[in-house]
Image: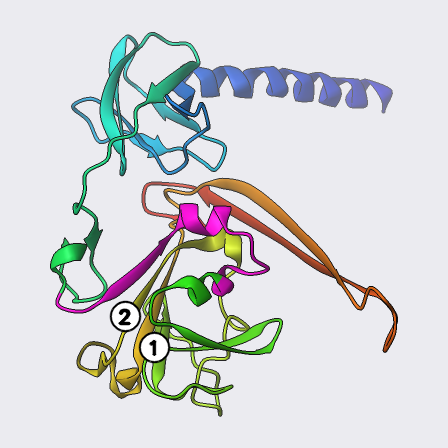
Amino acid sequence: MRKLTRVVLQLLVCLFFIVPAIAQSGGTVVSGTIKNAKSKEVVSAVSVTIKGTSTGTFTDDNGNFKFTTVIKPPFKLVVSSVGFSSKEVEYKGENVTINITPSYSLGDEVVVSASRVPEKILESPVSIERVSAANIRNAAAASYYDILKNLKGVDVTTASLTFNSISTRGFNGSGNLRLNQIVDGMDNQAPGLNFSVGNVLGLSELDVESMELLSGASSALYGPGGMNGTLIINSKDPFKYQGTSFQIKQGVKDIDGYQRPMSAYYDWSIRVAKKVTDKFAFK
């Protein structure tokens, strides 16, 4: 019995050494970090591909990228992202740190959802207020939904900490029946109420890529509920935004304890996203 156990253990030890060797011989692992050349901060959702091929990946929330290829180094990596100048870097087989330079071009921002066709945001036939992921990340608010209060022509009624009702035309109330709220192409109104209850049924802040608010009538584009306007919320693509993110927000209310004891507010959220293959990813 002891001899059999010893043989099994030896086979397991050999297996642990053989499997990594086979995995390493299957191709070249390309890895590195993308940073902003000016601020030295990491940049997420940056496309990194091998020049002349479609092999590549996107950086995660920490600015890191990693993929495997059968091409032997040296070869050139093409790095590109919206708001940054494209860059080509020669990869020689080691972990690299690539600095990309921000580029600004007035009026070149493109919006797809407002008119169902790609066009420049300044040439869109309707008024569009856009909130990017950078605005959401830098906002000092309990929820990304509170950013809408600062947009032009927006009126907000606060029914509770987690229920804000927005309006862009006409009268506002605790439940706006005349405003569409669409999350990734799906109507987000609560069943039985026929209106969206703020962000109660919405996305986590870690999973929001952008928000677009169409002020005024948009029924011709998004249905009869859009007499007052339409709010479009886009989530992060797990193919582009990979990795694990964690966020903690804390607050306190009733500090004086006059009417009720002091109570704390906690908002903890986590997002996990992984690209398994070129056609399958999860979050």
Instruction: Say if residue 283 shows up in the picture.
Output: no
In the displayed structure, would residue 200 be above or below residue 81? below
Residue 28's quadrant in the figure? top left
Work out whether residue 183 or residue 49 is closer to the camera in this orientation and state it.
183
What's the mark number on residue 214?
Answer: 2
How dense is the environment of label 2, judged by Cα within 10 Å: few (below 14), some, or many (20 and up)?
many
* Within-10-Å neighbours for mark 1: few <14, some 14–19, many 20+: many
Quarter of the picture holding the N terminus:
top right
104 left or right, relative to 178 = left
Q: Is residue 124 left or right of residue 211?
A: left
Closer-to-camera residue (107/31)? 107
Query: Quick check: marks 1 and 2 in contact, CB under 8 Å?
Result: yes
**Element type where label 2 sits in the image:** strand
The residue closer to the viewer here, 88 or 143, is 143
Residue 230: assigned label: none
Q: Judge by depth and name the residue closer to the eye, 83 or 182.
A: 83
Residue 94 in view here: yes
> Which residue is rendered at x = 48% and y = 87% of the image?
175
- Stretch in magenta: 125-146
Q: Residue 77 at what x, y percent from top left?
A: 27, 19
> Where does the image place residue 207, in percent across and percent down from the top left?
47, 54
Q: Is residue 88 magenta?
A: no
Residue at image position (51%, 70%) is: 199
Residue 193 drawn at (x, y percent): 48, 90
Residue with the mark numbered 1: 168
Task: Indicate yes or no whether the magenta region holds residue 132.
Answer: yes
Instruction: Give the residue at x 31% y 74%.
Output: 230
Q: Nearer the viewer, mark 1 or mark 2?
A: 1
Q: Amino acid at mark 1?
A: Thr
